[in-house]
Image (cartoon, rainbow, N blue to C red):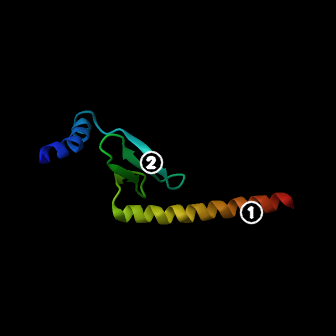
Amino acid sequence: MGKITNKPAFIPSMYCNIFGHDYEVSKKVTYHVKEYTCKHCKKQLTTNSNGHLIELTPKFKEINAILERIHNSRAERSKKKMITSSIY
């Protein structure tokens, strides 16, 4: 019975081992930082400070959450600034 439950998790990883991962953007953190997830095995990656793809660890999830919060607040402030400057 244990082998049957392991089978579904084994097939996607076997597919990725043969054909490679098929990543898609799962979250846009900022304009330059994104999170990616493999469609088959659900492996997650993100971009690091050098722009290279690395594994999405809990530490990088936390960093990305902080970056996203800062990015969104700056974008919102910039949007408000543009609206008020266009009125005057």
Percent of width and height locating residue 1: 12, 46
Question: Rounded to the nearest whole Å, what is the CA distance between mark 2 and mark 1?
Answer: 30 Å
User: Is residue 19 shown above or below 48?
Assistant: above
8 on left or right of 40: left
- The amino acid sitting under disc 1 is Lys
In the rendered image of this protein, does residue 59 appear above or below residue 27? below
* Amino acid type at mark 2: Ser
Q: Give the residue at x 50% y 55%.
A: 29
Image quadrant where residue 13 sits: top left
Counting other residues with Cα less than 10 Å from the Cα at mark 2, is it few (<14), some (14-19), or many (20 or more)? some
The disc, 2 or 1, on the residue closer to the chain's N-terminal end is 2
SS class of the residue under badge 2?
Answer: strand
Residue occupying image coordinates x 33% and y 60%: 57
Say which residue label 2 marks.
Answer: 26
Q: Quadrant of residue 64?
A: bottom left
Q: Which mark is residue 6?
A: none
Residue 6 appears left or right of 29? left
- Residue 62: give x, y in percent of width and height: 42, 65
Residue found 35% across the figure and 50% down from its top: 44
Circle 1 residues within 10 Å: few <14, some 14–19, many ≥20 = few
Q: Residue at x 36, y 51 (%)?
A: 45
Q: Secondary structure at mark 1?
A: helix
46 above or below 4? below
Tell us which disc is closer to us: 2 or 1: 2
Q: Residue 79: x and y, percent?
A: 70, 59
Quarter in which the C terminus is drawn: bottom right
Instruction: Report the disc number at residue 81.
Output: 1
Residue found farthest to the top: 19
In the rendered structure, the answer to whether residue 5 lies left or right of residue 43 reads left
